[in-house]
Amino acid sequence: MNILTFGPNGSGKGTQGAIVKEKYGLDHIESGAIFREHIKGGTELGKKAKEYIDKGDLVPDEITIPMVLETLQKSKEKGWLLDGFPRSLAQAEALDKALNESDMALDCVLEIVLDREIAKQRIMGRRLCANDNNHPNHIAFDAIKPVEKDGKLVCRICGGELSMRDDDQDEEAIGKRHDIYYDDTTGTMAAVNYFKNKGTAKIISVDGSKTIKEVYNEIMDRLT
């Protein structure tokens, strides 16, 4: 099974994606993780990508597309859940073409729908676990609040060290990221609509304002 996931930053798509991939034994492919590998490794592509990410801008297609498609090819036999790509109509068209050329079927498009202001609040309160970025920790939601240990907050799941992305506290940077996502002309919403209109994959749209469990249950009900 190959699943494409969409949702604005703060919608919880990474959390849901991690659960779904465990359920179906898929590779969870995150464009952000691919970028981080290159950035951590100090590659030329990583250095270029970091310049855009730090400003909250979209990483250009000539950097993003080759990295993502190479990773998808490695997971062709197992199946994958792709998170964070495509982020534009052009990337959606490039992905669709590459999937067709590689004889990889897109089985499902999963969209988590969330109001822009709620998404911003979620971003500013989230904390990232050093062991797994998909461990949900948020200072404003009781169900996923970090726990206190030795006078500091740690991951509620594994006890790992928590951190904040600098751009998660920058409202201007958040606005730029959301401008890209909510753009239904050339941005990410245009990519969502591209696959919806194509009509070859199952479309699942869920309300991201609900609890993690409620969102997951709805996804599972509609996937099966």
Image (spheres, grey):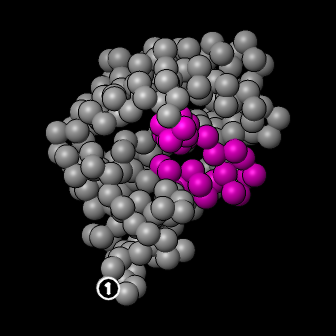
Residue 51: name its quadrant: top left
**Any part of residue 75 in sight:** yes
Quadrant (top left, top right, bottom left, bottom right) of the N terminus: top right
Q: Amino acid at mark 1?
A: Gly
Residue shown at 54% from the left, 74% from the top: 158
Q: Secondary structure at mark 1?
A: loop
Q: Is residue 132 above or below residue 78?
A: below
- Residue 190 percent coordinates (x, y): 40, 22
Residue shown at 37% from the left, 42% from the top: 8
| Furthest residue toward left | 172
- Residue 106 percent coordinates (x, y): 67, 29
Give the tally of numbered discs: 1
Decide if residue 2 is on the left or right side of residue 140. right
Stretch in magenta: 13-41
Q: Is residue 35 magenta?
A: yes
Residue at the disc numbered 1: 151
**Any part of residue 110 in sight:** no
* Helix, strand or loop: magenta stretch: helix
Residue density around tag 1, few if under 14, some if 14–19, many if 20 or more, within 10 Å: few
Return the residue nearer the eye: 55 or 142. Answer: 55
Q: Is residue 194 above or below residue 43?
A: above
Q: Is residue 14 above or below residue 145?
A: above
Decide if residue 17 is on the left or right side of residue 126. right
| Furthest residue toward front | 42
Residue shown at 49% from the left, 14% from the top: 62
